[in-house]
């Protein structure tokens, strides 16, 4: 069974930082592309970042990286804003640089990030 598990979410003040982690198990994800998405209350889920591309809304503030074990991925989020408040999801698929939900095959359960003003 393939599983992606996110962690690291929480409550932070505006201007602060958080690092989200995504751990993959059940399959070797060395050859998989991984990405981050988020869903704010009342809004549709939106693309955040892959390891080569970030959405304009987070560019310069968020950085994605892979762990040494290759089955882990991180999202470093700096200069957080209240509008970054959302449930953050990691995803894995076979299309590198993918930005659409339907291009990813596996999803985590999400981790809540809340940024207070």
Image: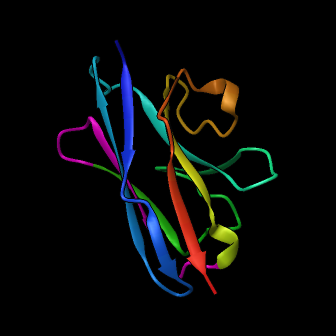
Q: Which residue is drawn at 51% across and 43% down?
A: 110
Residue 82 in picture, x, y percent from top left: 66, 77
Residue situated in front as seen by the camera: 6 or 59: 6
Q: Residue pushed farthest top? A: 1
Does 36 sit above or below residue 23?
Answer: below
Can residue 79 be found in the magenta stretch?
A: yes
Give the residue at x 18% y 39%. Answer: 69
Which quarter shows the N terminus? top left
Which coloring applies here?
rainbow
x and y, in percent, of residue 106 in the image = 50, 24
Q: What is the chief secondary structure element of the magenta stretch?
A: loop
Considering depth in this image, is 19 or 99 the residue closer to the camera? 19
Residue farthest left in this picture:
69
Q: Assign the C terminus to one quadrant of the image.
A: bottom right
At which x and y percent is residue 114?
A: 56, 68
Position of residue 70 in the picture relative to residue 116 (left or right): left
Please indicate whether residue 51 sits to the left or right of residue 40 in the image: left
Q: Identify whether 102 is placed above or below 41.
A: above
Task: Count the numbered circles shown.
Answer: 0
**Magenta-tinted stretch:** 67-81
Is 72 positioned to the left or the right of 61 in the image? Answer: left
Q: In which quarter of the image is residue 99?
A: top right
Is residue 89 shown above or below 9?
A: above
The residue positioned 39% from the left and 44% from the top of the image is: 6
Q: Is residue 102 magenta?
A: no
Seen at 57% across and 39% down, the residue is 97
Q: Where is residue 78 in the image (x, y as percent from the top left)?
A: 47, 77
């Amino acid at each position: 069974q393939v599983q992606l598990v996110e962690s690291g979410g929480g409550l932070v003040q505006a201007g602060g930082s958080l690092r989200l982690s995504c751990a993959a198990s059940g399959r070797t994800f060395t050859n998989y592309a991984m990405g981050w998405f988020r869903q704010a209350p009342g809004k549709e889920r939106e693309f955040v970042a892959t390891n080569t591309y970030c959405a304009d809304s987070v560019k310069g503030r968020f950085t994605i990286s892979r762990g040494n074990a290759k089955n882990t991925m991180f999202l470093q989020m700096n200069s957080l804003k209240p509008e970054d408040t959302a449930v953050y999801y990691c995803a894995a698929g076979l299309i590198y640089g993918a930005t659409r939900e339907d291009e990813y095959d596996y999803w985590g359960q999400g981790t809540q990030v809340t940024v207070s003003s």
